[in-house]
Each structure stands twice: as C-alpha cells, then as structure tokens.
Image (cartoon, rainbow, N blue to C red):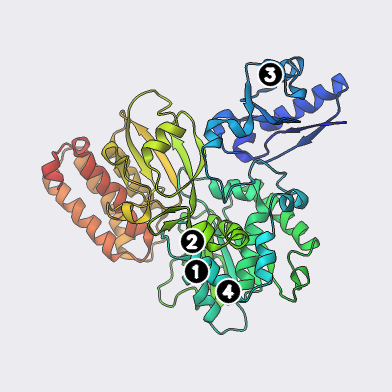
Amino acid sequence: MSTRIYVPIDSSALSLGAGRVAKAIADEAARRGIAIELVRNGSRGAFFLEPMVEVQTPAGRMAYGPVQVKDVASLFDAGFISGGGQHGLSLGPADEIPYLKNQERLTSARIGITDPLSLDDYTAHGGYEGLKNALAMSGADVVKEVTDSGLRGRGGAAFPTGIKWNTVLGASADQKYVVCNADEGDSGTFSDRMIMEGDPYVLIEGMTIAGIAVGATQGYIYLRSEYPHAFATLKEAIRRARAAGWLGQDVRGSGKAFELEVRLGAGAYICGEETSLLESLEGKRGIVRFKPPLPALQGLFGKPTVINNVISLASVPIILARGGAWYRDYGMGRSRGTLPFQLTGNIKRGGLVEKAFGLTLNELIYDFGGGTLSGRPVRAVQVGGPLGAYVPASQFDVPLDYEEYAKRQAMIGHGGIVVFDDTVDMSRMARYAMEFCAIESCGKCTPCRIGSTRGVEVIDRIIADEQRGKNIALLQSLCDTMLNGSLCALGGMAPYPVLSALNHFPEDFGISKTEAA
C-alpha cells in the first residue's frame, strides 16, 4: 500500500524549489523501495512555510516545511512517511497550524487540499453542488440568491454582484456573455492566481452558474500573460470539465449550454479596467470606453455581458450550495462574506489569509503576519494595490469594511496588503504611485494622461525643496482634478496613495500636518 505525499505545484512554491523537492522525494522513495503516491496540490497559502510537504496518515495530513532537497533524506530517516518520528521541520497536523486554523476559508476552501485537476477530488469536497442547485432553479432565482448573499465585486469597485447579473438577465439579446477579469496586476496580490492554479474548477463552476443564470452561452477568462502555469491549468481543467459534461451544449443533461475559453492579455495594467479589457478581448488596443452604455447592456461585441473578477465568480458556487443567507452571516455592515487578503511586503509570515470582513490590519499584520521581517516597527500599510491609500498605524484598528475605508478615502480593493517598516520614505512612495499611473495610463483622458506626468514633476520639486509650499498646493489641486475628472479608476484613484502619504506622513515632504491639511 502506497503513502500519499503532497507537494505544491503553485507558482510561489515552485519558485521556492517545490519542483525539485518533489523529484527528490520520488527519487528517495524509489531508492529505498518505498511505494508512494505523489500528489501535486495547490499551496495552502502559508508561503513562509513553502515548500510545505504533507503526508497522509491515519491521524490526518502531517506537514513539514519549509523543505529543501537537502532535507529529504533526513525526513525519510525520521520516518516522516508514517507521519511519526522527530524532525526539525515537523509542523504537526496541517489543519492545526495556527496561520491556517484561524482562517475562514469559503472561497479558497479546497486550495492546498485537493489535486487541482482532479474532478473526483473536486466533487468529493463539495464541488459542483452549487451548479446542480442552479440547474434546478430559474435564472431569476439564482440571481436572487446571489443578491441576497450580499456578494460585491472583489476587484476594487465593490459593486453588488446581484445587481449586475440582474441587469444582464433582464436585457434582451440574441447572445450574452460572461467575462472573468483575471488580469490580476495589482502589486501585492495573488489570490486570483492561487484559485486558478490550485482550484480551477471553482472558477469554471462559478462562471457556468453565471451563464445559466443570465442566459449567457459563452464565457471568456481574460488572463494576464504573466501567469503561464495558470494558463496551462485552466485550459486542461476546461477540457476535462467539458469531457465530463460540466461544459458544452447540454450541461449535465439540462438542455442549457455554456462554453468557456481562456484568452491571454498583453501585459497592460489598464486592461484590468473592465471596458479596456473588453476592447482587448475584441482584438483592439486596450483603451477605456465611455460609460454609458454599461457593459451589462452593451459589453463584449456590443452584447449584454457579466464581468466579474476571479474571486467574485469563485465565491458563487458556495453561495448556491449553502444559500445566500448562510453566506451573508459572514462579515459586517454591507460588506458580506469573506475576502482572501494577501500579506506581502516587509512581513514575517506572508501569504493568503481568508477572513470575514470586519477584522483589522492589526490582526492581519501581527496575529497572522507576525510583524515585519526586518523586526522594525510597521509605519505604513498600502491596502488595495498601487491605487490604494497608505494607512498609518493610527488607523490599524479600523475594521476592514468597504464603507469604513471609503470614509477615509481608502479602499480594500482586491485585498492586497503591502507592509512597510519605519525606514520607508513616504514622499518616494507617493512619487512611485504617481509614476505608476503615468506609465500605465491608456492616454484617453487628459486628467490621467497629463495629470500623472505633471504630478511626478511636482513631487520631484517638493522632494528637492523647490518652492515647497507652492508645489504642495499645486499637487493637492492636481490630485483633485484627477479624482474628479478622470475617465476611469486609474486616474481617479491614483491620488489616493499620494494624498494619504501627504496627509499622514507630511514630515517626509518637509512640512507640518497643518501645512498638509
């Protein structure tokens, strides 16, 4: 009888040597004449422990990490195959590791547990229960369930998913589409990639439910080109799902059709904006469209289109499986359910932390992250990607809730958390944010195209102490123009990090808090 051993195939784990560790384990087992079954699972998201190797035992899965090739022989010597013995890399039962045990994993429940491409594994762990329920319901009832759950877009704008779906459901057209925005380009984010590499069927199921609900028969996953592993995994998962009848002209004998394709983006950050994405998907240059018309009414190829990001769509199967009311019980206020937060930057224990809305940065940074890797005090945290505000330590106890952050001219966005210690120069970070906008602007609107370029120049003058007072006022005025005059969120939110750096850390700009106000 063989022993099942799990070694992640996630990109982050691979970058840390998981592929070499898997080969070393297979070679060592063969040399010792030990029968093993090597499963390449997704990462559980505790990247500070990767490569994390798990061994299936009668007492559950025992974890070891971070494992390197040089450690493999000693693991065998210590009897790790049976889950016993003493070894310095032993972590005990994987489910009892505090970083994992203290999470609320709904969307990412299977990541790291299953073989990503095994349909048997997927269904054995609750997969496709949501779609089965959806196929027995009317489209309106499916949309109502999603609406009742309180699910909002997990990509940045936090628009209610049910309202978007209901608009497409009510639109009359000979063709409708479902488009997944998988162009995960924000700094400090990787939850989309982890879903696509570690549990691709949950995204496929979520998109199929969306298609069945609104009457769309074709779906597209618009994937960033920098994700080759996700691309290969999604293509194979789609092939297997189609072969098993979960996709195609007659989904599981329901008489309802839904097909799915993956399309690679071309590396432009602006194509994370939904209308630019549609332009690119149609084979055009990725430039922002004017709204109205809304994509829900005139989207891909001018047809009604549901556009959601990966985490939004991957949250749908569990809502249809357990019910909207069950999902709504997680979270606070109008922020319902959970969000996979991604801990990055100067952090001791980086990785994925899925928790219900309402926790705080203090809990994320210290309880899960263990503070800074440098051991120095945390000075600022950027929440929500390169367009997110820099949050000072005085606000680390503010609940992570869409409305609470909006009150402070900040956003939760995609859940990216980038930590900085007290050595950071916030004037340089403000400059970086403005320069990022200048580089990534599609160029269609003047406030973003010209404003960001002038913004970099003004910040450079402030840093050089050239007429500092006059240039601070000019920067504030420029940010106001970008906030209120830009065509899309790139120019409209680029001032968030700039103004937050200026308001919360004025000393880095050579001024007092009074002068910054």
**Residue under circle 3?**
71
| Whether label 2 touches label 3, CB < 8 Å | no
Q: Residue at x 37, y 60 (%)?
A: 489
Q: Label 1 is placed on what type of residue?
A: Gly
In the shown orientation, is residue 409 left or right of residue 110?
left
| Circle 2 residue | 151
In contact (CB < 8 Å): disc 2 and disc 1: yes
Tell me the distance, in whole angstroms, between the alpha carbons under discs 2 and 1: 7 Å
Which residue is disc 1 drawn over? 162
Circle nearer the N terminus (2, 1): 2
Q: CA distance from mark 1 to mark 4?
A: 11 Å
Tell me the distance, in whole angstroms, between the alpha carbons under discs 3 and 4.
Answer: 54 Å
* Residue type pointed to by label 4: Asp
Earlier residue among tags 1 and 3? 3
Q: Number of numbered discs present? A: 4
Q: Quadrant of residue 459?
A: top left
Question: Which residue lies at the image location 38% right of the left edge and 48% below the top edge?
Answer: 400
Residue 219: give x, y in percent of width and height: 63, 67
Q: Residues within 10 Å of mark 3 (few under 14, many from 20)?
A: some
Crowd rating for badge 1 (residues with CA inside 10 Å; few <14, some 14–19, many 20+): many
410 with respect to 109 (left or right): left
Asked which secondary structure carries label 2, the reply is loop
Residue 515: x, y in percent?
11, 44
How far apart are labels 1 and 3 at the CA level? 50 Å
Q: Give the CA separation, mark 2 to mark 3.
A: 44 Å
Q: Earlier in the sequence, mark 2 or mark 4?
A: 4
Q: Is residue 276 above or below residue 469?
A: below
Say which element carries label 1: helix
Residue 450 vs residue 420, the one in the foreground: 420
